[in-house]
Amino acid sequence: MNILRIQAADGYEGLTVLDPNLPLEVFYADGQSRRDEYNPIKVQLRRTDENGRPLLRGDYPDFYGCTPCFSAEAATRMKGLLEQFGELLPLQCDGGKYFWYNVTTVYDCINWDKSEVVRLRSGRIIYVTQYCFIPERIASPSIFLAKGNEKIRLLVTPDVVSTFQAAGLRGMDIEKLKTVG
């Protein structure tokens, strides 16, 4: 089964959280809705790289690690699909309108005994080199988190990627995950 990971592509604009005291845990993906307690987070649009070169405008800006974020244009075009699997939460930005995408769909879909992983002495997984997905536990199309590996924020099925590409979304780096089994 092909499962893909979507990340922000290099060379495109990004967003920076303005509050240096905002804990990273705010953005931890756990499949829980944040809509009821959410207050828009202030961010700044990064238009240049660290060398002052202009960055391209995209629909999936780099945001707080690998936290999914969409431009207002992308959110509008993809709203029906995105809201099936998560929630679009507005960010407060002077440089444009953006939404943090909080994925609320979690599948227990990885066979950890057959996956190849790197663990700490404590047993905690720090890296997965090859996944063994359980296909019957993943609906298609789907945007989801994998239980036990929530740090990889945005996993998708190929038909979702096709929909994003057909909509002309820019600034996404799409990676097919290595799988076994």
Image: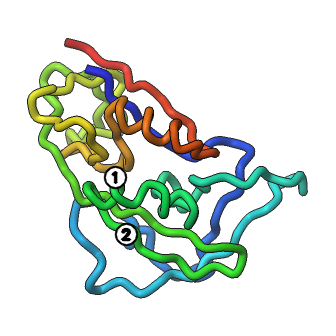
Look at label 1 and name its amino acid. Leu
Task: Tell me where residue 108 sits by quadrant.
Answer: top left
Disc 2/disc 1 C-alpha distance (Å): 26 Å
Q: Position of residue 82 (x, y in %)?
A: 35, 56
- Which residue is labeled 1 in the image? 81
Residue at image coords 32%, 29%: 3
Q: Is residue 106 above or below residue 114?
A: below
Nearer to us of marks 2 and 1 is 1
Along the line of sight, the residue nearer the viewer: 143 or 178: 143
Residue at image coords 89%, 52%: 53
Task: Tell me where residue 50 sits by quadrant.
Answer: bottom right
Label 2 secondary element: helix
Q: Residue furthest top?
A: 181
Q: Residue furthest left?
A: 136
Along the line of sight, the residue nearer the viewer: 131 or 76: 76
Residue at image coords 77%, 50%: 56
- Which residue is labeled 2 in the image? 25
Quadrant location of the C terminus in the rendered image: top left
Q: Position of residue 115 (x, y in %)?
A: 22, 23
Going from the N terminus, do you reach mark 2 or mark 1 first?
Answer: 2
- In this picture, residue 137 sits left or right of residue 95: left
- In this picture, residue 143 sits left or right of residue 134: right
- In this picture, residue 118 sits left or right of residue 20: left
Q: Is residue 116 above or below residue 24?
A: above
What crowding class fits label 2: few (fewer than 14 Cα within 10 Å), some (14-19), or many (20 or more)? few
Label 1 secondary element: helix
Q: Position of residue 176 (x, y in %)?
A: 42, 25
Look at label 2 and name its amino acid. Glu
Mark carried by residue 69: none
Task: Tell me where residue 24 sits by quadrant.
Answer: bottom left
Q: Position of residue 107 (x, y in %)?
A: 16, 44
